[in-house]
Amino acid sequence: MAHDSHIGEHCFLDICRQRDFLPFTCTACARKFCIAHFKPEAHGCPSTGSNDKRAFSCPLCLETIAYYANDDIEMVFNQHSQTTCKPHLYSARDAARKQVCPVPRCREKLTVVNSYVCKKCRTKVCVKHRFESDHDCQPPPSMASQALSWLMPSSSSSSSSASAKAKAKPSGTAASASSSAAGPLQSRKKDPQIRNFDVAAELRATAHRRQQQREGA
């Protein structure tokens, strides 16, 4: 069996030292142990708390800060406050933490794993009320309908004002025709030489001249 002496390792525990062909590695101290002593509590592992991850919430920005059990929490906080701390996000994160389900008589707190955004109405509810029949599901108005509702009052008012202007002011052709028709009469009224102008007499004179021309021809 001398040719198999290089296979496997002895248990690191002094009171055991058993040779194991498939030794186990401790996740905390990375040493080799047999199947009976590979757990940290079985061999009194001094690095048991080194992989024990913990977390606390920053009182300035409400960010969750992770640290190991062996770390100094004051040093971790000082490092965070000098590097990645964002106090201006405190209000937004505090409001997000206080979000609850909007369904009446449901006070379920909305978290990352316990919230659902409805695809139809875009409302954030708890997982229990995620179906459309369990909450007041009303699809939001589309952009086109919002634009139409915004433009409708202005278009009606503009059309009414345009019609009022059309009634108040005559058209350009009518105004020009009336001015052209009234032009000679107004000029005749203003001219002192033809103030007493008799239209019927002028017509009789014109007819008499034409008759004389026909007789002369």
Image: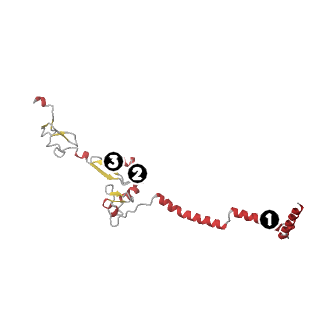
Q: CA distance from mark 2 to mark 3?
A: 15 Å
Tell me the SS state at disc 1. Answer: helix
Residue positioned 25% across, 45% down in the render: 51
Question: Tag 2, which secondary structure?
Answer: loop
Look at 50% across and 59% down and name the residue there.
Answer: 147
Q: Residue furthest left?
A: 1
Of 83 and 27, nearer the camera is: 27
Three-letter code, disc 2 = Lys
Of the numbered discs in the image, which one, if any, rests on residue 184?
Answer: 1
Q: Which residue is mark 2?
A: 86
Q: In this view of the protein, which residue sits in the foreground, 13 or 208?
A: 208
Give how far across and how far down residue 100 sits, in percent: 35, 61
Q: Earlier in the sequence, mark 2 or mark 3?
A: 3
Q: Position of residue 129 (x, y in %)?
A: 32, 61
Q: Residue at x 47, y 57 (%)?
A: 143
Q: Specify the quadrant of the image occupied by residue 173.
A: bottom right
Residue linked to disc 3:
76
The three-letter amino acid code for the residue at tag 1 is Pro
Q: CA distance from mark 1 to mark 2?
A: 86 Å
Relative side of 151 to 125, left or right: right
Specify the amino acid type for callout 3: Val
Camera-near label (1 vs 3) is: 1
In the rendered image of this protein, does residue 163 appear above or below residue 82?
below
Name which quarter of the figure residue 2 lies in: top left
Q: Residue furthest top?
A: 3
Q: Residues within 10 Å of mark 1 (few under 14, many from 20)?
A: few
Q: Earlier in the sequence, mark 1 or mark 2?
A: 2
